[in-house]
Image (spheres, rainbow, N blue to C red):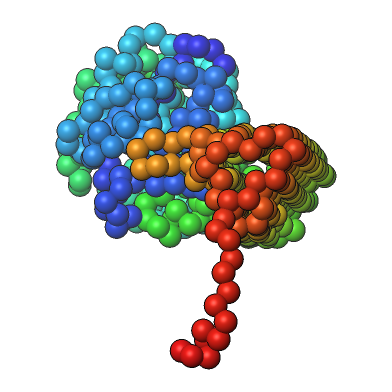
Amino acid sequence: MSTDLKVIILAAGQGTRMKSKVPKVLHKVLDKTMADCVIDSCLEAGADDICVVVGHQSMMVRKMIGDRVKYAFQKEQLGTGHAVMQAGDFIGDEGDVLILCGDTPLITSETIKEIRDFHIKNKNSATGVSFIAEDPVGYGRIIRDENGAFVKIVEQKDASPDELSVSEVNSGVYIFKADSLRKALEGLKNNNASGEYYLTDTLEAIMAAGGKTEVMKASDPNEFLGVNSKLDLCAATRILMKRINERHMLEGVTIINPENTYIGQDVVIEADTIILPGTSLKGRTRIGTDCIIGPNTEIISSEIKDGVTVRMSVLDNAYVDNFTTVGPFAYLRPGANIGEHVRIGDFVEIKNSNIDDGSKVSHLTYVGDSDVGKQVNFGCGTVTANYDGVSKYRTTIKDNAFIGCNTNLIAPVTVGEYAVTAAGSTINKDVPDHALSIARKRQVNIDEWARKK
């Protein structure tokens, strides 16, 4: 797509029907805010000069979206035309300007390209986008003449009974030649039932000035679903889930129950992996081939290599190498770096630690801020005590060490190669290679104590 395309995204509204303190465009569809969904589609289409018009809770919106876009501020919400006016300095006089809504998260990069191509091919000064609605209530109607040529857009509040019967509706998406848009905005009036400045009126103004104006009829109405309530948010999420899951299945991924599997837009999964029900894959997660993921598993921005099994566990910014098993009920926190053929078992938590190939952390164990070598075995109930209330320290366990059940490793401490810690020990000094370390009080039995009590 040509670089002389600018995009304005309207995101100033409060969204009162959402019944939320969170601005409407910051509500998430799967794992992305609606605003980010729209921005990402623009970037994927090749349009990287983007201005977001903010208003309600503008600082929160700007903080969430970040600095990858420019911003314009709409102090009062006086209509779509008024919102675009606030981006007047951004519009300029050359190239094309695409107008999108921040609450339409399902629009795709392919459709954005199609709109731009239609606009250029027909040499239009302004192009609107429409679709056929099963229930057109609430939408502006597209009015055409007897030859099918575009005449005007009529908002529902201003429409006659005949106009209300029209099922072709305005999507709220437009593309303009920049100079035509600027001139039309200069003459925009608010003499309508709402007292607002309608962006739709610019199309008629451009036509009146001799500019060619058309409306492109889009094939998929779902892409223009406006999210105005939590019910709409649920509907958009379902549509996006179906779209994403079908794409993965067509690429060779087995999803046992797509209706109960939640995969984010940026997730990558290779063929022959099986996703079991109740699984949620978020962020920039990457999963290799021949894996079994789930059921009831959440993976966030983690990398899973080939042949890995993850059952009923949570992984957050973790790395898991080939042929490792995780879970059930394991928690890999940020910085968990797990090697090949490792066993991470039930009720095990790993944080900011490296677990090298072939090691086993089978159950009821916490490993934090540690460097664990190859073929290390952790007994049940092991804890690395890495925090003294002020600072955190690392534990080092070298290759082939054996950590006995209920061992407490008080960092900083090193356990040498082939070393063994006896069950129930609290280790606060380094253990040499091949040594047995016993750190517990000698057992004392008091005869007849229980009987006397």
Residue 200 seen in this snapshot = no
Measured as percent of width and height from the top left, residue 353 is found at 59, 37
Q: Quadrant of the N terminus?
A: top right
Residue 254 seen in this snapshot = yes
Measured as percent of width and height from the top left, residue 343 is found at 74, 49
Residue, x 52% and y 31% (percent of image)?
Answer: 41
Measured as percent of width and height from the top left, residue 350 is found at 58, 45
351 and 180: which is toward the camera: 351
Q: Is residue 375 left or right of residue 171?
A: right
Residue, x 26% and y 18% (percent of image)?
Answer: 88
Residue, x 71% and y 34% (percent of image)?
Answer: 433
Residue, x 28% and y 37% (percent of image)?
Answer: 60
213 and 253: which is toward the camera: 253
Measured as percent of width and height from the top left, residue 4 is found at 47, 11
Q: Quadrant of residue 313?
A: bottom right
Q: Is residue 244 left or right of residue 389?
A: right
159 and 268: which is toward the camera: 268
Q: Is residue 205 left or right of residue 265?
A: left
386 and 238: which is toward the camera: 386
Q: How many marks?
A: 0
Residue at the limit of the structure toward the front, as seen here: 447
